[in-house]
Image (spheres, helix red, strand yellow):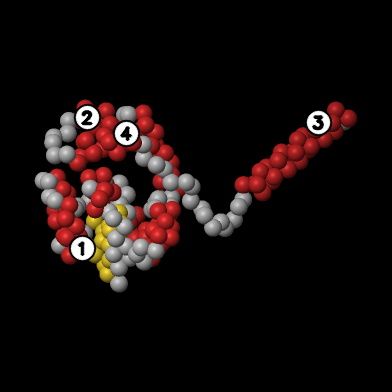
């Protein structure tokens, strides 16, 4: 009986110590409501932007081997995997432009137009960075679906207090064809500002 009692006592103390450790860990991990729930934004490596421009912006036929080399580049692969991990925690990507939106508000330069969309919109800035001059803001996210866009559309528009918000998903053929055929920067800007880009439905306040 004494042996059993010692074993039971040992098991009981082990359980108490384990429970105390778990409770302490939970107390340290539980943070409740926080003002800034988003992690630091991921910065795309230079090789990502350079190779992306070479693959998709300049008009040419892309061979499967070229795209595979881009996707398998160690820096590109690490960046994409990090984005996928974040997407598991923030499916609509509400955190993606949080800091950028705060910087826009702090600049006191109200944007006239905010473009939202998938990869066609996001990588437009790679093709023509001068177009996005503060009055025109790019909030495209590669791979986003309509459902994800709907979840972040109002959040982005309210955060930036934009006069016009445009969304383009899985299309943008006229805009894409424009800069791939060498359409001039000024001409593209006039199309966006005049609403002559029918593939991007716009909502104005």
| SS for callout 1 | helix
Looking at the picture, how far across and down is residue 17, in whole percent?
75, 38
The residue that label 4 is drawn on is 47
Looking at the picture, how far across and down is residue 55, in whole percent?
21, 36
| SS for callout 4 | helix
Marks 2/3: CA distance? 65 Å
The residue that label 1 is drawn on is 193
The residue that label 3 is drawn on is 7
- Of tags 1 and 2, the one toward the viewer is 1
Which disc number belongs to residue 66?
2
For mark 2, does the 10 Å Cα neighbourhood hold few (<14), some (14 to 19), or many (20 or more) residues?
few
The residue located at (88%, 30%) in the rendering is: 2
Q: Quadrant of residue 54?
A: top left
Outermost residue, bottom side: 205
The disc, 3 or 4, on the residue closer to the chain's N-terminal end is 3
Residue contact between numbered discs 1 and 4, judged by CB atoms under 8 Å: no
Which disc number belongs to residue 203?
none
The disc, 4 or 2, on the residue closer to the chain's N-terminal end is 4
Marks 3/4: CA distance? 61 Å
| SS for callout 3 | helix
The disc, 1 or 4, on the residue closer to the chain's N-terminal end is 4
For mark 1, does the 10 Å Cα neighbourhood hold few (<14), some (14 to 19), or many (20 or more) residues?
few
Looking at the picture, how far across and down is residue 167, in whole percent?
26, 59
- Of tags 2 and 3, the one toward the viewer is 2
Q: Is residue 107 left or right of residue 66?
A: right
The disc, 1 or 2, on the residue closer to the chain's N-terminal end is 2
């Amino acid at each position: 009986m004494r042996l059993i009692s010692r074993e039971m006592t040992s098991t009981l103390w082990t359980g108490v110590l384990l429970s105390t450790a778990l409770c302490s860990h939970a107390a340290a991990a539980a943070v409740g409501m926080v003002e800034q729930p988003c992690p630091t934004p991921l910065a795309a490596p230079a090789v990502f932007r350079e190779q992306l421009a070479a693959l998709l912006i300049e008009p040419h036929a892309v061979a499967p081997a070229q795209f595979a080399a881009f996707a398998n580049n160690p820096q590109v692969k690490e960046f994409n995997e990090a984005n996928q991990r974040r997407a598991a925690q923030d499916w609509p990507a509400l955190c993606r432009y949080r800091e950028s939106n705060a910087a826009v508000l702090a600049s006191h330069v109200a944007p006239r137009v905010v473009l939202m969309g998938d990869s066609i919109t996001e990588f437009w800035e790679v093709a023509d960075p001068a177009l996005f001059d503060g009055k025109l803001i790019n909030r495209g996210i590669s791979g986003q679906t309509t459902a994800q866009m709907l979840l972040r559309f109002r959040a982005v528009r309210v955060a930036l207090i934009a006069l016009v918000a445009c969304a383009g998903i899985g299309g943008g053929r006229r805009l894409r064809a424009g800069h791939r055929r060498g359409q001039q920067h000024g001409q593209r800007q006039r199309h966006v500002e005049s609403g002559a880009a029918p593939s991007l439905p716009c909502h104005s306040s």
